[in-house]
Image: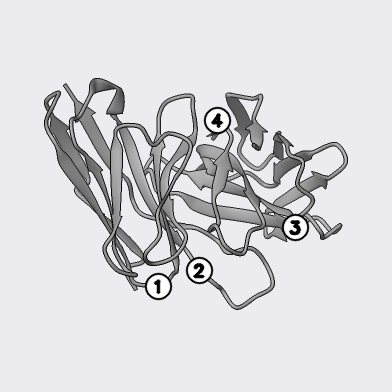
Amino acid sequence: NAGVTQTPKFQVLKTGQSMTLQCAQDMNHNSMYWYRQDPGMGLRLIYYSASEGTTDKGEVPNGYNVSRLNKREFSLRLESAAPSQTSVYFCASSGWTGDSGANVLTFGAGSRLTVL
Amino acid sequence: AQTVTQSQPEMSVQEAETVTLSCTYDTSENNYYLFWYKQPPSRQMILVIRQEAYKQQNATENRFSVNFQKAAKSFSLKISDSQLGDTAMYFCAFMKLSWSSGDKLTFGTGTRLAVRP
């Protein structure tokens, strides 16, 4: 199984350009997430989708939009990129694991975005 | 809102020795989960260990164990017999138990661990 696949892995944009980060999971998970990672700040939640057909804002949603295209895919769009959006972006998914513990998030490999 | 604090930005340990990474959190919730994730230079986020708050017994996974003090809201990670491959950034994370709003994680700022040969 591939797990969580996100594309592209690297991208350089100019201020004002738009782009979409794609994410797909093959684990039949219900919930999907987008995080950003900045130096010294850990990972912060941008948007999440608890189930197919729903999306909600996380801690840092400004400047982003998301689409839960189907159960497998969850995309993140930057409509007008700004230098403050230079970051590493992680997609993740979670679902019932069959045991009594917490659902564990599985992360993609990350996408490094630079906005000039 | 929950907050997670990792007060040690960087740590270093000699190979084969033991190191403890600290984490404290603040929450008004009673049912929650705590995690430690490892991020090596490859950038991949790897689950190290998890703890359910309702369990008094500390979780253990091979060389990794936690000291969970619920009243003190403390969740430290102990790595025994440190190996060079343990060199990574370690993140502590909190998850509130929720049946309807997904499994959102709140992360600390991380501790960079270097294992010296």
Q: Is residue A89 left or right of residue B60?
A: left
Q: Name the residue carrying label 3.
A: B59
Which label was assigned to residue A27? 1
In three-dimensional space, the C-alpha distance between marks 1 and 2, rounded to whole angstroms, equals 8 Å
Near mark 3 (Cα within 10 A), the count class, few <14, some 14-19 or many ≥20, is some
Spatial CA distance of label 2 from label 4 is 25 Å
The residue marked by circle 2 belongs to what chain? A
Residue B20 screen position, x and y as percent:
71, 37
Distance Cα–Cα, label 4 vs label 3: 22 Å
Q: Is residue A64 left or right of residue B1?
A: left
The chain to which mark 4 is attached is: B
Looking at the rendered image, the quarter that the N terminus of chain A falls into is: bottom left
Q: Which residue is mark 2?
A: A95
Q: N-terminal of the two: label 4 or label 3?
A: 3
> Residue B32's spot in the image, x, y percent?
71, 53
Of the two numbered discs 4 and 3 in the rendering, the one whose residue sits closer to the viewer: 4
- Residue at the outermost bottom position: A98
